[in-house]
Image (spheres, rainbow, N blue to C red):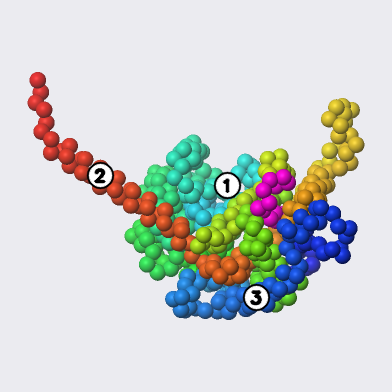
Amino acid sequence: MQLQDEAISFNYQNAIAPTRADEEWKPNVELQMQHFVSSTRLKALMPQLMQVKTQVATERELVDPPPSMRPLDAGFIDLPDKLLVDQRRNKERSDLSRIQNVASRLRGEVDRVVILGIGGSYLGAKALFDAVRSSFHNELPYESRMTIPRIYFEGNNFDNDAMQDMLELFQATCVNPDDTRERWATILISKSGATMETSAAFRILRKEVAELYGPKSEMLHKLIIPVCGVGDNPLRSLMHASGYIDDEIFTIPDRVGGRFSVFSVAGLLPAAVMGMDVKALLLGALSMTKQFLEEPFERNIVLQWAAINYLAQEELNKPLRVMAVWSKKLEALSMWYDQLLAESLGKQGRGPTPITSVMTRDLHSRGQQHQDGRRDKIINNVFVKTTKSAPLAIGMSDRNEDGLNEYSRKTMPVLMEAAHKGANEAYLEVARPTTDLVLPQLSEYTMGQVMQMLMLATVVEGRLMGLNPYGQPGVEAYKRKMRSILRSQQSMNTQNTAVERSQPVPSAG
């Protein structure tokens, strides 16, 4: 059962315009009336918002939608519940148990795991890794990591030097395949099975892993874990040709899009390898779905987030959406949201532009623009209430040239909270709208809540805009162009080779 202190909360009062009766009339109040969401307008949105809520709830039940509604990747909504119910009913034969068993085996057999994927095939796992595990997890000694392997993310770029750096690391540290601490494994994630960045990286890594374990070693099947979509899939065909059977290939459900797949095997298998409580993650997501489906607007964070951000973008001319995370451990979460928002709503010449800011770091760079620049932004703060470790105090010093002795009893969390409140007050004074999403702590349960909330809210906002939040036709355009360029280059190389071969060889002398 969810406890009150485990629930995330959302405060949007600093984005709501005052009324003349609220306080003495001042110039900044006039600005707030222009740039904050009107409570009257928010109230007027309620019928449309409730209609969209019903629409989204209904869409999740459509297994075979009409062509006009496709793509409809609403399967993510009920996925946490289905996985948990499946495990209760089918025990070891369930998908979740299979994920946990493979993850447990990997933790016992290797000390490094490379997660190959791009977009939704890695961003969710990266967000979970950064939030829940130590910031220096890979640097910790083997014993301190409690059998949890070092985690690396690749296959998300064509960056030659970055790939070579990782290969050199493995070549220098992984030379004895009989030593568990020198073994590494790969989780290969591609729903389409044809993503060029991931496929190219896998071909390079497959050569490396064959050299370490031997091209015909039985270890290859155990330490290369493929994850792909259903049906006719290039990655699935490749693995079949390599001797894999379907039971050795994990499948992302058909109605779960890549950027909505964090609670499928694409996110859960890496999370389980990282030693996370994946059931707590799913329970957090399930609690948010339940809140979305059952609670009124006043207690429904999904609807609140969607409504405030929708009105700021569509009616207040604020196309820039800043996610200001007040913890470096949440930067990857914000990058995950960047993709979710951009691919879902950046269509037909519309949609907000996501921006990630890490506080207080970026108060010393973007803070100037947020405070004093163009009025084209809404700032959504994400704040963690309780730290994992004991608060660190500044302390007293016999040298006080830095002037910190007066704050000697203050701790880092106290300073962070003061900076957060100070920034909000400064923004409020100059009519810059902000909201606060508060996490009680960084845990699997709270991350489950936050990520499900953001996915649901993005779908709701898309429906409010009259857009299909699923699919990403703009992304496919660059892929087509890239492949066309590569084929043209190959054709030209072939022609040049043929011409060279046809030239007579000059005689010696």
Number of the label disc, if any, that sits on residue 492: 2
Q: Where is residue 352? Give x, y as percent.
A: 59, 58
Number of the label disc, if any, that sits on residue 48: 3
Q: Where is residue 375? Give x, y as percent.
A: 68, 51
Name the residue nearer the viewer: 478 or 263: 478
Residue at image position (36%, 49%) is: 215
Residue at image position (56%, 48%) is: 151
Please name the residue that numbered disc 1 is placed on: 150
Secondary structure beneath label 2: helix
Of the residues under marks 1 and 2, which one precedes in the sequence? 1
Q: CA distance from mark 1 to mark 2?
A: 43 Å
> Callout 1, which amino acid?
Arg
Of the residues under marks 3 and 2, which one precedes in the sequence? 3
Which of discs 1 and 2 lies nearer the camera? The answer is 2
> Callout 2, which amino acid?
Met
Magenta-highlighted residues? 370-386
Left-right relation of 492 to 117:
left
User: Is there any visible trace of residue 291 in the rendered image?
Assistant: no
